[in-house]
Image (cartoon, rainbow, N blue to C red):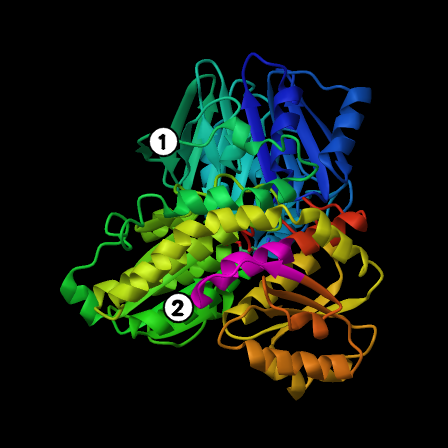
């Protein structure tokens, strides 16, 4: 949450920093701001709303310099106001800072500083941090930062300017991510690597409890005690073209349409006459038999992918399977020991709840694996073993193509664990892996139905809510479909196991509450049809996601969207695509900010 960008170098800083903020705006868009040093003093420009507003403000009142920092905010402490927007400065303007995270003891520090005569002009925890640093500053920036960090509790990524040190800037990480680079005579920092790709792919991923001092072409790294550390640069395989919208009106649509190729990439080298994940997640025969439990732990969309995987794990591994949201897992009491395989699923690899959950599992001695799209993420480094999604950077706040990558990676994992434990029949392994490699073409054929799905969405523009239902794997897909719709259209949508409808949700049904049913031709088909009868008897309009060739479903549904036939265990790969497109088109028809839905941020780095 919150986008951070810093630059020092020969270019005019405002262009570089604002370009970076535009790239990072999916991390927060409540307000935006920039601070620029002209070599003597630091000037600040900030405003409520998007980076576009800041850009317009800067066009009228430009700030010029070669060192600067910028921020897009996702509000935590204090409302969405100009005063609360970052950067923040101490009252004398000696220190200026931007922040991502939460300072838990800000109130007591604020009272202490007030007692020393410090005047605050915002409601933020961030202003407390900058004023604390300013009171501790006596000409040695690193010492002031270290002393301040020792007093702060919580999670923070800071980028700090000192007015009397115009050739350096400083970064601190304790929790939220920060990446650095210092190609030739420049230096950069950002909260996400995508903002740096136009300049370099040689990146330093800061570790927790590190302080960096950046100057032109150079990075010095220290721990919180001031001891120097090695500067570890990694080469990132992504490039800047992957972060452009191209011909698409929204990243979300581009990312939905990319899903066939994402699936090909996720499967590449892992499926060949069966499944083989030995390079990423090796097991000895002894280990494979010793495990008793598998935990799948994630948030949001990643959690729904885990629900799908949990069912496949039940079917193929013979392990005791538990699927849990990270925020609950962290504080739960389930056994998590050396006989447990704990899998943490996170697109970004930066979700604070999932990181905390992984620490719990590691402390219990579980065998841990991260399933993530970002191989250098905090989660990947925390856990060690990584199964990469290979989806490429996902910019739309509503996750789509990474969900596809997660379905693929987790399905392979279920098959792989089952195989190593001797629980997966060879015929099932071949049946499913052969169909997996056929799925990309089927997904690509589905994407071509975009206009027809838009026509269906048009019928529902005025409704106040939806009920999504499905059974088995389709229950999880209903939940993910409802989440997509909520996130980008703001229409109320709730999802239930179809069999649960009669235990309560059916009370809501009438002509004004459409039911979206995920009803492929699988084991549950007839049972779900019965539930649709019940919905129809209450006059609820029905949108059905069904299998091509299903002649019966149109007797029940007001609108049908068909997906190609596939193996029962793999229906989620296809049924999710029309639901993503349905949410996309409905939101688009309603004129919503699709890639930047209100109140959300792509990477949730606070608990
Ligand atoms: C998905 O559309 C959401 N933006 C959100 O639910 C997301 O899946 C969740 O915050 C988890 O993120 P992660 O996969 O990066 O951990």
Which residue sits at x=67%, y=67%?
Answer: 544
Q: Residue furthest right?
A: 462
Q: Which residue is mark 1?
A: 234
Q: Residue 230, image x and y in percent?
A: 31, 31
Q: Secondary structure at mark 1?
A: strand
From what the image shows, is residue 201 above or below residue 114?
above
In-front residue for pair 283/404: 404
In-front residue for pair 300/512: 512
From what the image shows, is residue 563 above or below residue 315?
above
Q: Residue 276, image x and y in percent?
A: 26, 52
Residue 92 appears in the picture as rendered = no
Of the numbered discs 1 and 2, the one sitting upstream in the chain is 1
Q: Which residues are magenta?
A: 561-580
Q: Main secondary structure of the magenta part?
A: helix
In-front residue for pair 121/270: 270
- Asked if the beta carbon under badge 2 is closer than 8 A to the nearest atom of ligand 1, the reply is no
Dot 2, how many residues are within 10 Å of its Cα: few (below 14), some (14-19), or many (20+)? many
Q: Residue 601, image x and y in percent?
A: 62, 49
Q: Which residue is mark 2?
A: 312
From what the image shows, is residue 93 above or below residue 591?
above
In the image, is residue 569 part of the stretch drawn in magenta?
yes
Q: Quadrant of the C terminus?
A: bottom right
Q: Quadrant of residue 50?
A: top right
Dot 1, how many residues are within 10 Å of its Cα: few (below 14), some (14-19), or many (20+)? few
Q: Secondary structure at mark 2?
A: helix
Q: Residue 432, image x and y in percent?
A: 36, 60
């Amino acid at each position: 949450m919150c986008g951070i960008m810093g630059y020092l170098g020969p270019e005019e800083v405002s262009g570089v920093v604002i370009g970076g903020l535009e790239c990072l705006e999916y991390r927060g868009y409540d307000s935006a701001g920039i601070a620029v040093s002209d070599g003597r003093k630091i000037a600040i420009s900030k405003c409520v709303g998007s980076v576009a507003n800041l850009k317009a403000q800067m066009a009228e009142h430009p700030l010029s310099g070669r060192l600067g920092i910028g921020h897009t905010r996702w509000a935590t402490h204090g409302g969405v106001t100009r005063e609360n927007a970052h950067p923040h400065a101490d009252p004398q303007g000696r220190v200026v800072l931007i922040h991502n995270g939460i300072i838990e003891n800000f109130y007591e520090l604020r009272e202490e500083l007030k007692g020393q005569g410090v005047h605050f002009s915002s409601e933020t925890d961030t202003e407390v941090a900058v004023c604390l640093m300013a009171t501790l500053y006596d000409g040695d920036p690193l010492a002031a930062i270290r002393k301040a960090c020792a007093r702060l509790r919580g999670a923070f990524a800071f980028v700090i300017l000192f007015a009397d040190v115009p050739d350096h800037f400083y970064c601190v990480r304790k929790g939220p991510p920060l990446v650095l680079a210092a190609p030739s005579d420049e230096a950069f920092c950002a909260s996400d690597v995508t903002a740096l790709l136009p300049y370099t792919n040689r990146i330093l991923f800061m570790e927790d409890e590190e302080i960096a001092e950046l100057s032109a072409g150079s990075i010095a790294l220290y721990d919180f005690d001031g001891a120097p550390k090695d500067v570890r640069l990694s080469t990132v395989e992504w490039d800047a073209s992957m972060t452009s919208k191209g011909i698409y009106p929204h990243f979300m649509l581009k990312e939905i349409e990319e899903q066939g190729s994402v699936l090909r990439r996720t499967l590449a080298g892992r499926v060949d006459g069966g499944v083989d994940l030995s390079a990423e997640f090796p097991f000895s025969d002894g280990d494979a038999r010793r495990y008793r439990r598998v935990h799948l732990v994630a948030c949001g969309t990643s959690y729904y992918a885990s629900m799908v995987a949990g069912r496949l794990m039940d079917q193929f591994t013979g392990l005791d399977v538990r699927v849990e949201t990270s925020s609950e897992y962290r504080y739960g009491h389930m056994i998590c020991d050396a006989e447990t395989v704990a899998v943490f699923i996170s697109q970004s690899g930066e979700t604070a709840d999932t990181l905390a959950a992984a620490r719990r599992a590691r402390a219990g001695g579980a065998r841990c694996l991260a399933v993530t799209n970002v191989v250098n993420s905090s989660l990947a480094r925390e856990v060690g073993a990584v199964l990469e999604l290979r989806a490429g950077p996902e910019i739309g706040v509503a996750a789509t193509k990474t969900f596809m990558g997660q379905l693929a990676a987790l399905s392979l994992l279920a098959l792989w664990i089952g195989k190593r434990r001797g629980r997966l029949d060879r015929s099932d392994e071949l049946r499913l892996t052969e169909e997996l490699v056929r799925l990309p073409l089927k997904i690509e054929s589905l994407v071509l139905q975009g206009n027809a799905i838009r026509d269906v969405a048009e019928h529902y523009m005025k409704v106040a809510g939806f009920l999504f239902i499905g059974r088995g794997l389709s229950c999880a897909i209903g939940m993910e479909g409802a989440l997509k719709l909520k996130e980008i259209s703001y229409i109320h949508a709730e999802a239930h196991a179809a069999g649960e409808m009669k235990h309560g949700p059916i009370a809501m049904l009438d002509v004004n509450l459409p039911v979206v049913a995920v009803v492929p031709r699988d084991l549950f088909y007839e049972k779900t049809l019965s539930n649709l009868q019940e919905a129809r008897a209450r006059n609820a309009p029905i949108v059905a996601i069904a299998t091509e060739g299903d002649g019966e479903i149109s007797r029940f549904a007001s609108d049908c969207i068909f997906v190609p036939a596939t193996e029962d265990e793999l229906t989620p790969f296809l049924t999710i695509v029309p639901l993503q497109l349905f949410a996309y088109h409905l939101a688009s028809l309603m004129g919503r900010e699709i890639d930047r839905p209100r109140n959300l941020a792509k990477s949730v780095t606070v608990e």
